[in-house]
Amino acid sequence: MLTFEEIVETSKLVMKRIILLSTLIFSLTFLKAQNLDPWTSYATPSTFHQLLSKYNGSFNINVTMYMEEGNAPVVEKAESYQSMLLGERFLEMKQFGKMMNMNFLAITTIGFNNTDQKVTLTSISNMGTGTLTLTGDWDEKSNSATLFGQQTNPVTKKVIKVKQVITFIDANTILIESFDQEGKKPFRKTMQYKYTRNKK
């Protein structure tokens, strides 16, 4: 036969389990009611994706390349055809034009992960065989994202840290500024892409 103290301890344990179970059931019911179960939240386009969808269409690009110190920047023109992919989840930017008298083709995608709240940009082009992947935080106040990643210098084989700042200036304009850092040197602005909607 159980002692009085054992009965009390058993009762406490049972109550704890009941409370835990009730909390779990309530949490699951609440999440389901709010349509906020993790997988649904992860898969459902958010307000950031709605922002991206504003940039469907044809854009002109002013590409500014910042050469070594003392040299004037080089400005080139390109075009970008942009569309949302996979059920309004990713913005694809297909770019084409001339760079340094060579045909230039590139594909950039911009997305937003609802789970970790990170913006991700990927970029591939006919100027190389690598894939640039950058990830960073969204700042709603400035309507911009600051992303970081890295690539390997084809000449020195050393890693270059890359920073890009994407600013959605208005519904017709996107500015992407790119900075490189080699070794312990400070970040240096290397490229700037200004996308302006083609209204023709």
Image (cartoon, rainbow, N blue to C red):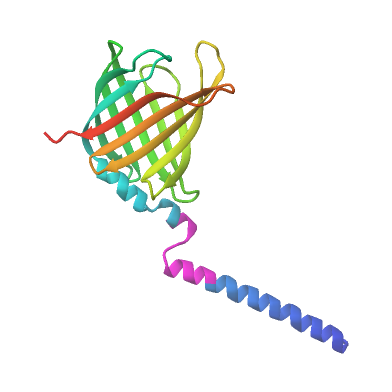
In percent of the image, x 26 and y 43: which residue is there? 170
Q: Residue furthest front?
A: 70
Give the quadrant of residue 93: top left
> Magenta region: which residues?
27-40
User: Is residue 38 part of the magenta span, yes or no?
Assistant: yes
Camera-side residue: 142 or 28? 142
Where residue 11 sits: x, y (%)?
75, 83
Q: Residue at x 49, y 57 (%)?
A: 38
Residue sitting nearer the eye, 45 or 165: 165
Does the segment drawn in magenta span residue 182? no
In the displayed structure, 119 sits above or below 61; it is below
- The picture quadrant where one finds residue 79 is top left
Along the line of sight, which residue is nearer the eye, 151 or 13? 151
Q: Residue at x 41, y 51 (%)?
A: 43
Which of the image's four quarters has the N terminus? bottom right
Q: Position of residue 86 (x, y in %)?
A: 33, 43
Taking the spot 86% from the left edge, 85% from the top edge, the residue there is 5
Of helix, strand and loop, which mostly describes the magenta segment? helix
Residue 139 is situated, as x and y percent measured from the top left of the image, at 42, 47
Q: Position of residue 89 (x, y in %)?
A: 35, 45
Point out the residue furthest to the left here: 200
In the rendered image, the quadrant that contains the C terminus is top left
In the drawing, does residue 155 fall left or right of residue 35?
right
Location of residue 166 with respect to 66 vertically, above or below:
below
Position of residue 115 relative to residue 23, above or below, is above
